Amino acid sequence: MAAGRAFLGAPCSSLATGARRLAFASLPPRALAPALRRRVPGRRVASVSSSPDAASAPEPYVLTTPLYYVNAPPHMGSAYTTIAADAIARFQRLLEKKVIFITGTDEHGEKIATSAEASGRNPKEHCDVISSSYKMLWADLDIEYDKFIRTTDHKHEGVVNEFYSRVLSSGDIYRADYEGLYCVNCEEYKDEKELAENNSCPVHLKPCVARKEDNYFFALSKYQHKLEELLARNPDFVRPSHRLNEVQGWIKSGLRDFSISRASVDWGIPVPNDTKQTIYVWFDALLGYISALLDDGEQASLQQAIDRGWPASLHLIGKDILRFHAVYWPAMLMSAGISVPDAVFGHGFLTKDGMKMGKSLGNTLEPKDLVERFGADAVRYFFLREVEFGNDGDYSEERFINIVNAHLANTIGILLKYICFCNMYILFMRAKTYYAFCLLSSHSVHFNYASFCVNNDIVLLI
Ligand SMILES: [Zn+2]
């Protein structure tokens, strides 16, 4: 603790704001070029070149976090995804891209209604409270998103309705009875072969309940070959590569149609032409990535939203929702005749002191508390520096304090002190740039005064 507090007075803490405001012009183009040539695959490099063509055809870099489920306030996992997405967005802005960084909240479904009831509020009030807590945390963490979409926004509902109608016209929606074991927390039916002991959900470790419903289904099985072709043609669609193997395995083992409506859930968007049912949470929430592109108050039109910058360049998600993003979502888009995103990156989970975090274990890491104690810069730096991007990573308070003091307070702090003494204004501006790159770094950053050389796995995402 004492060491952590010592850091708070370090001179570098004020630099985050400066780095954020940094104009690309202050970074010598020649300094950035070697890193890009080494690390960045072709298409995106072209868009940062100084050629007139690149300037005349700006391609927005649309980056998304998941839309977080508002059954509970934000946890460290949500904060981690958003910090990483923010670092990528900052890097893309440094490359002078038009960045549209989308985040938001997923607010429909049975679990939300249950959480609202437990807290003594109606669902909308509950969603307002929890959604605000996300916005407050993102402000505390210095997250600079461009769009915050709530799935209870009017424009979103219009887009979902239009999308549903397109998929219906494609002949990919049908009605059928379904009977099976259902996990209320996942809000999905489970295959018996994937269940843990006592018919428990392998994610939530709670028993699934037998349920029978008359639902609408999406014909996912029709898209097996198209998805295989997509992954064969573009292996970078799912990253990192070990997650691609996982997705290929799911597809190879056969895809089952999935239910896209619920008869027993009132808190949701009604199915067009059948108001007795509401649209299944994923068939609703995933569309938020598109509806977010509309401006507030703009007419809810699917095509208009698409014209604002779709397809997304990158969906950044936790590995637990990979199946929805890398299998369900591209198939849904294909059915509606809409381009699939460029890439889906599934990062790992965080542990604390080497153990899985959980309320039942009493070892959760509250991002709000962490920011209040150590400040946004320290929290951002630690998780970007210490977690190898894509893999699981661990937090321990001792390591947190040591890393932050050693790197931010000592190395960068002393560098800046030296620069201030020398009164070398230009170098100072470059140091701020260097600090922005530090925030992007998941492993190692090499720095010298002659050039900026960033060796960074996040750069691979460009
Ligand atoms: Zn579950």
Image (tube, rainbow, N blue to C red):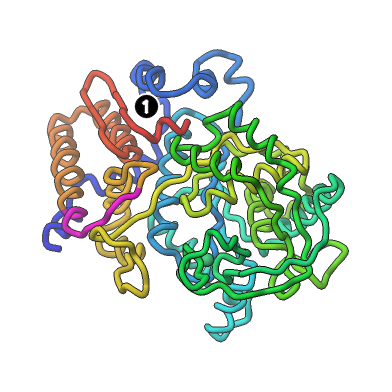
Which residues are the magenta region?
Answer: 392-401
Badge 1 residue CB within 8 Å of ligand 1: no
Q: Is residue 286 visible?
A: yes
Q: Which residue is mark 1?
A: 26
Q: Is residue 179 left or right of residue 344?
A: right
Q: Is residue 443 left or right of residue 98?
A: left
Q: Nearer the viewer, residue 450 or 38?
A: 38
Quadrant of the image containing the N terminus: bottom left
The spot of residue 280 in percent (x, y) is 69, 62
Q: Is residue 84 left or right of residue 341?
A: left
Q: Is 23 drawn above or below residue 324 in the view shown?
A: above
* Disc 1 secondary structure class: helix
The residue at 47%/65% (across/down) is 196
The spot of residue 365 in percent (x, y) is 32, 65
Tell me the kind of residue under disc 1. Answer: Ser
The residue at 20%/59% (across/down) is 397
Q: Is 139 drawn above or below residue 413 in the view shown?
A: below
The spot of residue 352 in percent (x, y) is 27, 60
Q: Is residue 176 left or right of residue 127?
A: right
The residue at 51%/67% (across/down) is 201
Q: Is 5 drawn above or below residue 238 in the view shown?
A: below
Q: Is residue 131 visible?
A: no
- Judge whether residue 288 is colored magenta: no
The spot of residue 450 in percent (x, y) is 23, 18
Q: Dot 1, crowdedness within 10 Å: few (<14), some or many (≥20)?
A: few
Query: Which corner quadrant of the image does residue 177 belong to?
Result: bottom right
